[in-house]
Image (cartoon, helix red, strand yellow):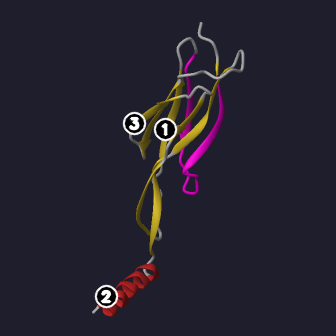
Amino acid sequence: MTRWIHRAIGVICFASILAGCIPYRFIDVPGFRGTVVSAKVGQAVVGARVSLSMGRGSTTEKPIGSVQASSAGAFILEPKRYWSIYIVPMDFIGYFGTVEVAASGFKTVRIPFKSAPDAAACTEIGEVRLEPAG
């Protein structure tokens, strides 16, 4: 019986691939990493709030999550992925959004982004330089 089940699973998988159905790990929420520094003195901005908001297709952006920069000014917004079936040909709808970096005494920086089918799950933003407010 077990041998029959393994063969059946194999046949189903093979038939699915021939039909253009491929298991694929999609990115549900992209990730970002970088460092927040003061543009004036070049030092880390400890505790800066880094927020992510996104939309899909033509919807408006919605807040997804936020993190605080570490004592070194570093931050990581972790990506969220999921497994599904990619059906060839499939239209990629994509997503868009904004990474917002804010800290007390500094002007807020907004970094827009747009998805791409071949984009990395986590994008390195590098240094985000905050200008003093006022």
Q: Which residue is mark 3?
A: 60
Magenta residue check for 24: no
Figure check: 29 above or below 15: above
Magenta residue check for 108: yes
Residue 132 horizontal side relative to residue 92, left or right: right
SS of the residue under disc 2: helix
Q: Amino acid at mark 1?
A: Gly
Q: Which residue is mark 2?
A: 5
Tell me the distance, in whole angstroms, between the alpha carbons under discs 1 and 2: 45 Å
Tell me the distance, in whole angstroms, between the alpha carbons under discs 3 and 1: 9 Å
Q: Which residues are magenta?
A: 107-129
In the picture, the disc for residue 97 is 1
Dot 3 or dot 1, earlier in sequence? 3
Q: Amino acid at mark 3?
A: Thr
SS of the residue under disc 3: loop
Magenta residues: mostly which secondary structure? strand
Q: Residue furthest right?
A: 41
Mark 3 vs mark 1: give the one in front: 1
The front one of 110 and 65 is 65
Give me the residue at 58% from left, 57% from top: 118
